[in-house]
Image (cartoon, rainbow, N blue to C red):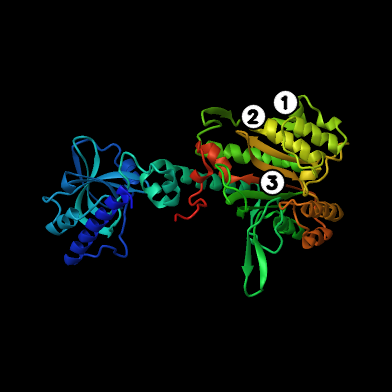
Amino acid sequence: MTENEVGEDALHAVRLEKLGELKKLGLEAYPYSFAVTASAAELAKRYESLPAKTETQDRVAIAGRIRSIRNSGMFIDLHDASGKIQVFSHKDILPEAGMAVVRLLDIGDIIGIEGLIRRTPRGELTVNAEKVVLLAKALRPLPEKYHGLADVETRYRQRYVDLIVTEQSRETLRKRSQVISVFRRVLAARGALEVETPMLHTIPGGASAKPFITHHNALDMDLYLRIAPELHLKRLIVGGLADTVFEINRCFRNEGISPRHNPEFTTLELYAAYVDYTAMIAIIEELITAAAREVAGGLQISYGGKAIDLTAPWPRKSMAELVREKTGVDFLAIADDAVARQQARALGAEVHETSGWGRALEGVFAHKVEDALIQPIHVTEFPREISPLAKGHRGNDQRLTERFETYINGWEVANAFSEINDPRDQQARFEAQMRERELGDEEAQRLDADYVTALEYGMPPAGGLGLGIDRLVMILTDSPSIRDVIAFPTMRPKA
């Protein structure tokens, strides 16, 4: 047991003793409710013009967590979800029963206060307590005020403590919620319909990823946690539920953990009938710029000390063009897979022996170009080999598709394409993916025969997009890790 744990155990014992004293006084340490009439922020706004040294007869009821106790409880800093307000508890105002409660309070306790509003000579908005009600006795101490949760692992494991003591953590997660609200507002104005699709799939589809597997006892069958909602959303387009559908969805991929990757993450996916991938560019730019204005206060932001300008429209460049600009090698002029692999390896990219031209091009892009795309850009014309759900490009090079990814700060934040609606083409793409699985690619997509059947009933031309909410929130809040923007990130249990 560490020295800190010994100290915490001792404080825990002291608080248990106080809990016992409260019971001796006939007081309930965990009552059922408390009627709150105002928040700290509401009171600050309501009384912002109240002069110092002014007392009122305005009675309020507030509640929150004690963050500071001074002068043996005479002054208490009470924090609720909106902010801080000072409480003044004195024997001239507070009956002895209330003073008895105050003497048994600790930092971290949640209390309710009834009393009159005043402004102290020092200008502090204060509630003169006439009644003190203990709402929840905190049996464990909070981290020391000025250092907070120094252990990053503890911050993520005990997010509830982190949120109590770290305003930045609270603000980041609130901004995440704001981003999602902005997305819903923008898409509702566009007439899009929000829907829900299954999280348990019989076939993991819609993306190239390794799934989590679970088992349904009653049906005696394996199921897969959703890696993407794409194929179900497009089934709704086939069914004519709406011309534009979207889902803000949790996805699960059995992959590594890093500052930019969590096994479960949140995306926005949208599919719109009668448009192609160029329409998705406009939607992505509108969503991200609206979110930036809401949570970052504008389009000029900073991430990790780098200035980023989100002013739309953003440049559009093909993957092959960006590779040529960076390396001098024109992959569009290379016709042979083996030559493409050889050239990619010469440029330092890791390419598997079974990879074709498309994977070789992607490998060089990832190795040489991706990290340098700090300012927002749409990277277009992805290879067919790595785009099994995207329509072929309308140009002369059949190795390319009408797919793009949006990059900010060197990260992919969105992925979009013109959707395949020819069932024969989709069947052939799935079969090509199955061949890659047979060659050892665990992330290659599987054949979803029912989805092909759905396309045989006719799906209109459509564009689709996926936008990574976690990474976008990281960028808009200047958060260094994806764990900072997910309330409860995946962690290995402590021994």
Q: How many marks?
A: 3
Query: Relative to residue 55, is residue 37 drawn left or right?
Result: right
Query: Residue most toward the bottom?
Result: 218
| Residue 326 circle label | 1
**Residue 376: where, in percent of width, then height?**
64, 32
- Residue topped by disc 3: 465
Query: Relative to residue 264, is residue 148 drawn left or right?
Result: left
Image point 86% across, 40% down: which residue? 398
Q: What element carries label 3?
A: strand
Q: What residue type is labelled 2?
A: Ala
Query: Residue most toward the left?
Result: 92
First reached walking from the N terminus: tag 1 or tag 2: 1
Q: What residue type is labelled 1?
A: Lys
Which numbered disc, 1 or 3, marks the residue closer to the eye?
1
Q: What residue type is labelled 3?
A: Leu
| Residue 120 circle label | none
Image point 51% across, 50% down: which residue? 489
- Residue topped by disc 2: 372
